[in-house]
Amino acid sequence: MQYLLLIYANEAQIEGQSAAERQSIFGEYMDLANNLRKTGQYVGGNRLDSVSKATTVQVRSGKRLAMDGPFTETKEQLGGYFLIEAGDLDEAIRIAERIPAARWGSVEVRPVIPVPVPAHV
């Protein structure tokens, strides 16, 4: 079963780290991704750009609304994700606790519900 591990952290806290600290943490992420890839559990993942570059889109009464930034104000921002294969929720949680940001932020573990998309003919 696939699980999406949503990685939340305070962007200001991360930006306050030295370049060496950020590089070390990035190395931890790469090590984890490579280890999960070796076991066949890594499906994909990416870091997201700053929340200051986000745009939130809504459609109300048939009209599009586009707003700068996230929809809600929070202390932690979604900074990236891992999409993994795990046998069950317990295994997904064990992987989530290995994500570096779990030490200062949080990692939300969500089962993925596959949606078949028909191919265009």
Image (cartoon, rainbow, N blue to C red):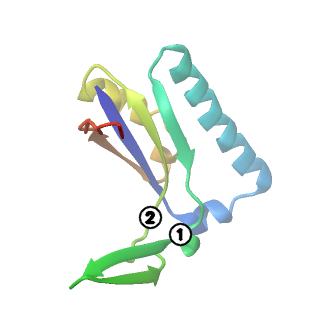
User: Residue farthest to the top?
Assistant: 39
Answer yes or no: is residue 61 visible.
yes
User: Can you say which quadrant of the picture contains the N terminus?
Assistant: top left
* Horizontal side of residue 18 vs 117, given as left or right: right
Mark 1, residues whose alpha carbon is within 10 Å: few (<14), some, or many (≥20)? some
* Horizontal side of residue 101 vs 3, given as left or right: right
Query: x and y percent of residue 120 in the render?
Result: 36, 40
30 above or below 21?
A: above
- Callout 1 secondary element: helix
User: Can you say which quadrant of the picture contains the C terminus?
Assistant: top left
Which one is earlier in the sequence, the residue at label 2 or at label 1?
A: 1
98 above or below 108?
A: above
52 above or below 22?
A: below
Q: Residue at x 32, y 76 (%)?
A: 58
Q: Residue at x 55, y 15 (%)?
A: 38
Amino acid tagged 2: Glu
Query: x and y percent of residue 103 in the render?
Result: 48, 46
Q: Quadrant of residue 90?
A: top left
Query: x and y percent of residue 80 in the render?
Result: 50, 50
Q: Which mark is residue 51?
A: 1
Residue ID for mark 2: 76
Q: How many marks?
A: 2
Q: CA distance from mark 2 to mark 1?
A: 10 Å
- Callout 2 secondary element: loop
Amino acid tagged 1: Val
* Horizontal side of residue 57 vs 68, given as left or right: left
